[in-house]
Image (tube, rainbow, N blue to C red):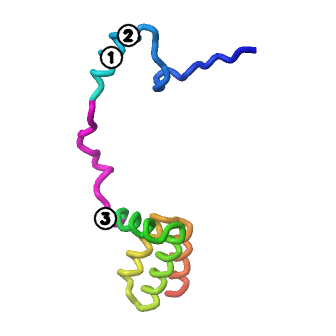
């Protein structure tokens, strides 16, 4: 039984017979060499995301738990702004853990 490889149209492996030879190199040269287009508005710079990525780089997989612990420490000290900041970091790293911290903070304030 023979097996025939058939790549998806548009994939890097797919080269139609018409584009073989000189026309293929012409087609490849026409492709843009850079992607310097302006980013869309949704891709705006987010300093909290950068800080979350640095926190993850420093602490690894336990980064969400350390951010949650820092948020809880800030809440115990009465620093609401610090709590919101660390909760935002926790939200980037683990949404479920952030929801748990929010519930605990609401229960503590009642």
Q: Please give the residue where the numbered disc 1 appears in the rendered image.
A: 25
On residue 47, which mark appears?
3
* Residues at marks 1 and 2 touching, judged by CB atoms closer than 8 Å: yes
Judge from the rendering whether residue 84 lies leftward or rightward of residue 101; answer left or right.
left
Inter-mark Cα distance, 2 to 3: 49 Å
Judge from the rendering whether residue 26 lies leftward or rightward of residue 75; answer left or right.
left
* Residues at marks 2 and 3 touching, judged by CB atoms closer than 8 Å: no
How busy is the neighbourhood of tag 1: few (under 14 within 10 Å), some, or many (20 plus)?
A: few
The rendered magenta stretch, by its main secondary structure, is classed as loop
Tag 1's secondary structure? helix
Sequence-wise, the earlier of marks 1 and 3 is 1
Q: Is residue 2 above or below residue 45?
A: above
How busy is the neighbourhood of tag 2: few (under 14 within 10 Å), some, or many (20 plus)?
A: few
Q: Please give the residue where the numbered disc 2 appears in the rendered image.
A: 21
Q: Looking at the picture, how far across and down is residue 41, in whole percent?
A: 28, 49
Inter-mark Cα distance, 1 to 3: 43 Å
Residue furthest to the front:
21
Query: Which residue lies at the image location 33% right of the left edge and 21% below the top edge?
Result: 28
Q: Quadrant of the N terminus?
A: top right
Residue 82 or residue 16, whichever sits in front: 16
Tag 3's secondary structure? helix
Which region shows up in magenta?
A: 33-48
Nearest to the eye among marks 1 and 3: give it.
1
Residue 39 or residue 101, whichever sits in front: 39
Judge from the rendering whether residue 110 lies leftward or rightward of residue 83; answer left or right.
right
């Amino acid at each position: 039984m023979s097996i025939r490889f058939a790549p998806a149209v548009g994939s890097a492996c797919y080269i139609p017979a018409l584009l073989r030879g000189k026309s293929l190199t012409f087609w490849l040269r026409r492709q843009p060499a850079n992607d310097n287009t302006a980013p869309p508005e949704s891709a705006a710079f987010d300093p909290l995301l950068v800080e979350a990525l640095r926190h993850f780089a420093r602490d690894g997989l336990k980064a969400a738990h350390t951010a949650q612990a820092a948020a809880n420490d800030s809440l115990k000290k009465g620093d609401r702004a610090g709590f919101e900041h660390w909760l935002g970091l926790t939200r980037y790293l683990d949404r479920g853990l952030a929801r748990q911290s929010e519930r605990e903070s609401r229960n503590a304030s009642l």
